[in-house]
């Protein structure tokens, strides 16, 4: 079994603070109460958005690979290729196929590219940002056996 949450880096949590301060300052023109309301609403909205973005999960459970909203049986998957930072950049840019499924997080430098062998599926491969591509590849291989 494999389970990874692609949480946002701690430094990104300054973004909701900046959003709250910006909205609060904009609305402060209308008085201190709207300014405080803008601060709170901007902070909460930014935190909810960042938390949602950073809640993407990759799991290998019960013979399936679950990546974000996608669920695919490991029997429909072929070779898994761990990608270092340079190869990951290439596969999400110049080598990318528009038909590929990508669970991409820019703050995760490494990835795993997994071939899709199901002839009924038009997706050629899955590109999954992961902090431990070797462990994910091993989990997919173990679930296939």
Image (tube, grey):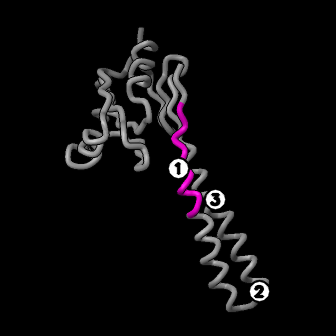
Residue 99, can we see it? no
Give coordinates of residue 75: x percent, y percent.
39, 17
Which element carries disc 2, helix, strand or loop?
helix
**Identity of the residue drawn at 28% across and 25% down:** 119
Q: Secondary structure at mark 1?
A: loop
- Marks 2, 1: nearer the viewer: 1
When asked about the image quadrant of residue 117, the answer is top left
Q: Residue furthest top?
A: 145
Task: Please provide percent x and percent y for residue 61.
Answer: 54, 21
Residue marked by disc 1: 9
In this view of the protein, which residue sits in the foreground, 145 or 130?
130
Asked if residue 94 shows in the view, the reply is yes
Residue 1: image x %, image y %? 53, 19
Residue 75 lies left or right of residue 56; in this view the side is: left
Check residue 59 for magenta coloring. no
Q: CA distance from mark 2 to mark 1?
A: 32 Å
At mark 3, the secondary structure is helix
Say which of marks 3 and 1 sits in front.
1
Q: Which residues are magenta?
A: 4-14
The residue carrying mark 3 is 47
Which mark sits nearer the N-terminus, 3 or 1? 1
| Residue at left offset 44%, top offset 27% | 72
The residue positioned 62% from the left and 67% from the top of the image is 17
- Whole-angstrom CA distance, mark 3 to mark 2, is 22 Å
Is 7 part of what is drawn in magenta? yes
Q: Earlier in the sequence, mark 3 or mark 2?
A: 2
Residue named by callout 2: 32
Question: Looking at the image, do the residues carrying marks 3 and 2 touch, with CB atoms under 8 Å apart?
Answer: no
């Amino acid at each position: 079994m494999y389970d990874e949450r692609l949480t946002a880096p701690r430094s990104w949590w300054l973004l909701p603070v900046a959003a709250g301060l910006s909205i609060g300052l904009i609305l402060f023109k209308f008085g201190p109460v709207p300014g405080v309301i803008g601060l709170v609403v901007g902070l909460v909205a930014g935190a909810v958005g960042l938390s949602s973005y950073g809640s993407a999960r990759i799991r290998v459970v019960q013979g399936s690979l679950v990546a974000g909203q996608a669920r695919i049986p490991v029997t429909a998957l072929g070779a898994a290729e761990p990608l270092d930072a340079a190869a990951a950049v290439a596969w999400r840019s110049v080598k990318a196929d528009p038909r590929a499924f990508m669970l991409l997080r820019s703050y995760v430098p490494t990835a795993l590219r997994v071939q899709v062998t199901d002839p009924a599926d038009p997706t050629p491969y899955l590109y999954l940002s992961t902090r431990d591509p070797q462990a994910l590849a091993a989990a997919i291989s173990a679930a296939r056996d």
